[in-house]
Image (cartoon, grey):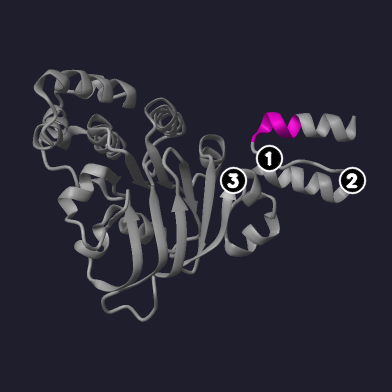
């Protein structure tokens, strides 16, 4: 479980807080999507959950972040990394090996995974992320999107209880983006892994995540199930969140007809709502 209580953080030398009085609980096995406009504090929150803040980033830190009962400010980063795997927005900063296979092996060997499990985990991660053909390629020969997949695969192989991803599909095409989120859902549902994903592609989050947290100016503006968060389209637009077109359609349909229309999160639901209301 992730428990964040009254978290406030200001980067060293900054003139305002990046996070301000954030309180949030993420239960075990949840799939939480974090959204919000640029500068809202999304990456800062992801780094706080993973312990990067306050251990590796300087600033004023108030409040508490607890992961499985351990206070991240009082727990060594190496110990936190056994519980929380983090994929950074800048994947270049976390890939240290020159060959794809070695990048996955580095984590498996250093975290003491039994030798008889290593090959199975390595193969599983490469295949699930869709980069099995890249196993013996040099990292320098890969595209930005492929390197992003390598970073994700290296953590999938470790199977931490919590996986935090900061813009995991930033450099991926639509097909690869869905592939990554399908993998995250598999890890969430079949392996019980808690997923926290910062993502701009809100349509993906609405399809795969269970809950959403909306950040605005360093604060939690809204938090709840996907449909609960999307029920107030106007408020989200004012914050600067681009809502899914299906949700916009259902909101307009209810507004123009006066009918009760549930929040739609995909095209199929929007079509069904139109048929029911408009005949």
Q: Quadrant of the C terminus?
A: top right
Quadrant of the rendered image containing residue 20 = bottom left
Secondary structure mostly seen in the magenta stretch: helix
The mark that comes first in sequence, 1 or 3, is: 3
Q: Secondary structure at mark 3?
A: strand
Residue 121 as seen in the image, left or right of residue 252 = left
Q: Crowding at label 2, few (<14), some or many (≥20) Cα neighbours within 10 Å?
A: few
The residue sitting at the front extreme is: 69
Q: Residue under label 2, please give it.
A: 257
Image location (x, y in percent) of residue 34? 47, 51
Q: Which residue is mark 3?
A: 225
159 lies left or right of 267 = left
- Pointer 2 or 1: first along the chain: 1
13 shown above or below 56: below
Q: Residues within 10 Å of mark 3 (few under 14, many from 20)?
A: some
The residue lying at 77 percent from left, 29 percent from top is 272
The crowding category of the residue bearing disc 1, from other C-alpha atoms within 10 Å (few below 14, some 14 to 19, many at least 20), is some
Highlighted range, magenta: 266-271
Query: Do callouts 2 and 1 mark residues in contact (Cβ within 8 Å)?
Result: no
Badge 2 or badge 3: first in the primary sequence:
3
Where residue 27 sits in the image (x, y, percent)?
Answer: 45, 45
The image shows residue 68 at horizontal and vertical percentages of: 32, 48
Q: Which residue is mark 1?
A: 246
């Amino acid at each position: 479980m992730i428990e964040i209580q009254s978290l406030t953080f200001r980067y060293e030398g900054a003139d305002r807080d990046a996070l301000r009085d954030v309180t949030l609980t993420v239960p075990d096995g949840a799939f939480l999507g974090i959204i919000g406009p640029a500068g809202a504090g999304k990456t800062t929150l992801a780094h706080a959950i993973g312990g990067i803040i306050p251990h590796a980033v300087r600033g004023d830190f108030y409040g508490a972040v607890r992961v499985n009962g351990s206070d991240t400010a009082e727990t060594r980063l190496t110990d936190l990394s056994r519980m929380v795997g983090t994929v950074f927005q800048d994947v270049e900063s976390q890939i240290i090996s020159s060959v794809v296979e070695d990048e996955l092996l580095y984590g498996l060997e250093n975290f003491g995974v039994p030798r008889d499990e290593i090959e199975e985990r390595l193969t599983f991660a490469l295949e699930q992320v869709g980069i099995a053909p890249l196993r013996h390629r040099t990292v320098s020969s890969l595209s930005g999107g492929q390197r992003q997949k390598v970073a994700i695969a290296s953590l999938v192989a470790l199977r931490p209880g919590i996986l935090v991803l900061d813009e995991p599909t930033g450099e991926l095409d639509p097909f690869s983006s869905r592939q990554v989120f399908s993998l995250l859902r598999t890890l969430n549902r079949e392996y019980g892994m808690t997923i926290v994903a910062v993502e701009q592609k809100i349509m993906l989050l609405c399809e795969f995540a269970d809950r959403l947290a909306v950040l605005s100016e360093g604060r939690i503006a809204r938090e709840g199930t996907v449909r609960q968060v999307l029920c107030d389209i106007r408020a989200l637009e004012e914050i600067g969140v681009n809502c899914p077109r299906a949700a916009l359609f259902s909101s307009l349909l209810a507004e123009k007809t006066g009918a009760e229309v549930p929040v739609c999160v995909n095209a199929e639901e929007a079509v069904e709502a139109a048929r029911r209301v408009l005949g």
